[in-house]
Structures are given as C-alpha cells and as structure tokens.
Image (spheres, rainbow, N blue to C red):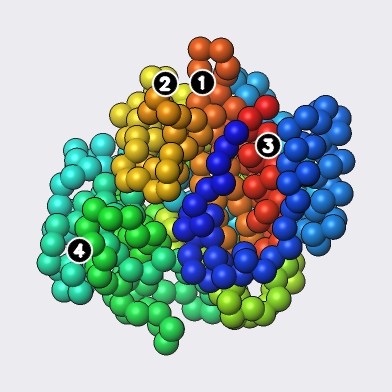
Amino acid sequence: MLKRMSKGIVCAGLFAFISACSDPMVGAEVREQLETAASADISRIIGDEAERLGVTAMSVTVLEADAEPQSLYFGRAAEGGLFQAASLSKAVAAAVILTLAEREDVALDDDIRGQITSVDIASLSGGDRAITLRQLLSHTTGASQSGYPGYPRDSDLPTTADIISAPPRIFESTLAFDGTPGEFLYSGGGYMIAQLWAEDVSGMPFEALADELLFDPLSLEQSTFSQPIDEAAIAPLTLVGADASFDALDGVFTSVEDSWHDYPEQAAAGLWTTSHDYARFAAALLDAADGADNAISSDVAKAMIAPQVALEEGQHYGLGTQLVMKDDGSIRFVSHSGANTGYRALFSARPRTDDKPHRVVVSFTNTTSGASLNEAVVFALTGK
C-alpha cells in the first residue's frame, strides 16, 4: 500500500498546502472501492466522486508493461486535451537537463555557476558557494521560492533571468540561497536556476531543448513547455481550462473559468501535457532505469530515481521524483504531485519486479478539489 506523500511535495508550496487543508476530501471508502473494483466499475466510481467534488474535467491514464496506455475522461476532458502538469513538470525537466548535462560532460556535482552567463549567480544572496545540478534537482541547494502562482493570460511574461534576479511582482523577491546546503527545502526557484543553466549552455529556449532531447525522440506529441501556449499551433490538440475562484491562500489572485495562468517558470511548473503522454514518459523513465536506453539514458534514469535526500520515514526525493521505499531499500513507487492555479496533478509508477510488470498511473484534474481524488485514484490503481 502506498503511503500518503509528504505534504511538502503534495502541496508543492505553501499556498497549495494551506488550501488543501480546506478542500473537500475523498473518503477512505472510495479508495477501498477502487482497489477492489472490477475494471468496468472503475470509471463509474471515479465519475461519481468527480461530480460530487465539482471537478469539471479529469483525465486518468493507466499503463502497464508494454501495453497501450488506457485512459478515462470525465467532464470537459477528452482525448488530446492538454492539462497543466504543474510540479510534475520537474521530473520531465530533470530528464531534459540531465540529458543535456550528459551531452556536455557536466557531472552532477560540478559547480555550474561559471557556466551560467545570463545571471551572476555569485551575486545572489548565498550564491558565493558551489551550486550543483544534484543540489538543484533534489531541492538541497537551499534555494528560496517554493512555488509560483503563474501569470494571468494577458500579462507580459518575465524571462528566466528576470524570474531569478528581477521578478516583476511586489510579492516575489530575488532568489536567494538562504537554506542549509544538503537539507531538503522544496524550491521551484532551484529548478529555475537549472533551467537557466540549460538555456545558457545550449543556447536554446527551454521548450525547444525539451523538444529536441526528449519529446521528439520519445514521440511525445501531446507535450510542450511552451509558455504562453498558442492554441492554434497545437491543433488538433486542445487545452483543458481550469476552474478556480479568487483565493489568496491558494495563490489564485485572479479567478479562472475554463482558463489558465501562464507559467514562464517552465522547469518548475510549465509543462502542458496529457495523462496519456505523461504515462508514456514515466514508463520510458522506468525502462531506461532497467537498462533499456531510449531518449533517456540508463545513467540519467538511474540517477533520477536514486534516493538523494530523506523525507518522511520510508520516503526520499530523487532528481525530479519522489520515492517510496521498501524495507530492503528498493523502490516501491516513483511519484510526484503538482498544484498550479486550478490544476491538480499526480503520478505514481511501480517499477518492474520479478513477479510484476511496471505500472504507471497518472491523474489530472482542473479544480483544487481534485487533489484528494487524484490521490485516491492513483494510489489505488498503482497497487492493482
């Protein structure tokens, strides 16, 4: 049975944590029903609970072994409908960044400050100490800025360098390294440093780099880091808008109705994708960790799902992933959750064992009330 993930990851930041405490919750009986339900009843159970919670769009995908992903859609969700993956972006971004590092012969523990040319990292508070990709991608560099609320769609978007050193909004500060190196401190800001490194080293926008290194080679044709996203350019794919009322505690400073905020913080929270595509990415990660190189090398995949820092008992953070461990030190599940304005996302992947194939479950919803439903669905179905 999968343990409930630590609040620091589930909520992906202080705003989401506070809001989650008051969101309507799914009862334990729903998860129990899903764990024992026949396949034909799973859709009905999820649909009934989504309606009760006011979730207006939801997409769930299950992928086992080498079979085709199986997806369920509810409300406004449909095949080819993209959701914001929120902090699930971090696992994909980590794969892109580490693939680039491998190509450029940059080690996980190299000090990368000198390779960043758009911002003088050493000039930031605490930036006079070594900064490594391992630290940034495992949230152990002590960087500030846990998460980001996004920008209303009519806003001018800052550059990656501006987000780090000159954020335009009065409630955001210049990124600082004010935590203790080596200790876990969830930081979307750290992922922005890693994104800036990738852009400076490659000379490419992050969305183009992701296309080249990951999405095109894996044929993930329903995924993009484009921010803002051009609806005409992605046709016939569509966008599933979020529904969220104004709620300062949840970081929603403008309400959205079948709409969204833009996230120039791409590596931290800017991925648009489908549950179908994300499941294929997660399966490719597990395959690569098992030694089957694809766009993700075995070395990169193994590093991503290797425990880097301990969280709660039995849980660790890897590089862009959270890990639930068995007593013998092997991985029970690889997972991550996310919370953008209106969107809630969660995936869990069970690695292959001697008696079971790998299994991936991904769930996206477009309302904050979908968070606990994601947990019930993903945790129940991953263990089947």
Amino acid on which disc 3 is placed:
Ala
Query: In the displayed structure, would residue 332 be above or below residue 134?
Result: above
Q: Secondary structure at mark 4?
A: loop
In which quarter of the view is residue 108 placed? Answer: top left
Task: Please name the residue that numbered disc 2 is placed on.
Answer: 290
Query: In this view of the protein, can residue 365 be seen by the observer?
Result: no
In three-dimensional space, the C-alpha distance between marks 4 and 1, rounded to whole angstroms, equals 42 Å
Amino acid on which disc 4 is placed:
Thr
Query: CB under 8 Å between callouts 1 and 2?
Result: yes
Relative image position of residue 351 (x, y in whole percent) = 50, 26
Query: In this view of the protein, can residue 21 be seen by the observer?
Result: yes
Q: In this image, 250 relative to 354: left or right?
A: right
Amino acid on which disc 1 is placed:
Arg
Task: Please name the residue that numbered disc 1 is placed on.
Answer: 352
What residue is at 44 percent from the left and 34 percent from the top?
325
Q: In this image, 202 relative to 337: left or right?
A: left
Query: CB under 8 Å between callouts 3 and 1?
Result: no
Task: Please name the residue that numbered disc 4 is placed on.
Answer: 117
Q: Nearer the viewer, mark 3 or mark 1?
A: 3
Q: Nearer the viewer, mark 2 or mark 3?
A: 3
| Residue in the foreground of this view, choosing between 256 and 16 | 16
In three-dimensional space, the C-alpha distance between marks 1 and 2, rounded to whole angstroms, equals 8 Å
| Label 2, residues with CA under 10 Å away: few <14, some 14-19, many ≥20 | some
